[in-house]
Amino acid sequence: MKVFDLSCEHGHAFEGWFASAEAFDEQLGRSLVHCPVCESANVRRTPSAPRLNLSNPAEARARPVPKTEHARPTAMPTHEQLRALWLEAARHLVRNTEDVGERFAEEARRIHYQEAPERGIRGVTTAEQRAELEDEGIDVFSFPIPAAAEEPLQ
């Protein structure tokens, strides 16, 4: 098996396991390779060190891979497992934050400048508003909810 580092058009990084480089190219050409986060089929290979998944344990012992802090897990989570983890994180976020909708930037400023009670909020903002918040030292992060989320979050 060949293990490739991949990325979608939105910058989500993930791994793909393929029988060969040709198998990857063929599947990519048929739009069978999708990002596990946003379901985009606009995927490309990113630079990576060559890695092989050896199915025979004896072969794996014969060619040990040095363990480092940055070693990757040997088994890639399945698409369903990744979706379940994402959904769990999304539900936690929804349960533990207040939805302020379009007022996100305004409310984040009020909290930052102690004009409103400190609490977790979520909502929507433009890229320009987000840049302005960051310029003011207000930490925000994006947590996009892709169309692939099939279950209600609440």
Image: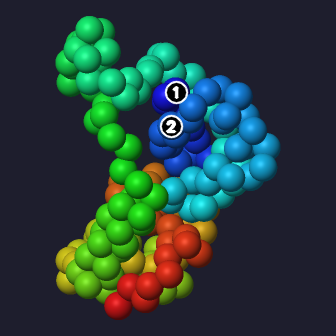
Q: Amino acid at mark 1?
A: Lys
Name which residue lies at 51% across and 56% down.
Answer: 36
Name which residue lies at 65% across and 57% down.
Answer: 40
Residue named by callout 2:
17
Give neighbour class at mark 1: few <14, some 14-19, many 20+ (Cα, 10 Å). some
Name which residue lies at 44% across and 21% down.
Answer: 52
Q: How is the image coloured?
A: rainbow
Question: Where is 137 relative to 2, above or below?
Answer: below
Left or right side of 23 for 75: left
Left or right side of 72 for 18: right
Q: Nearer the viewer, residue 26 or 112?
A: 26
In x, y percent, where is residue 96? Answer: 23, 81
Question: Where is 87 relative to 127, above or below?
Answer: below
Q: Which mark is residue 2?
A: 1
| Dot 2: element | strand
In x, y percent, where is residue 81? Answer: 36, 61
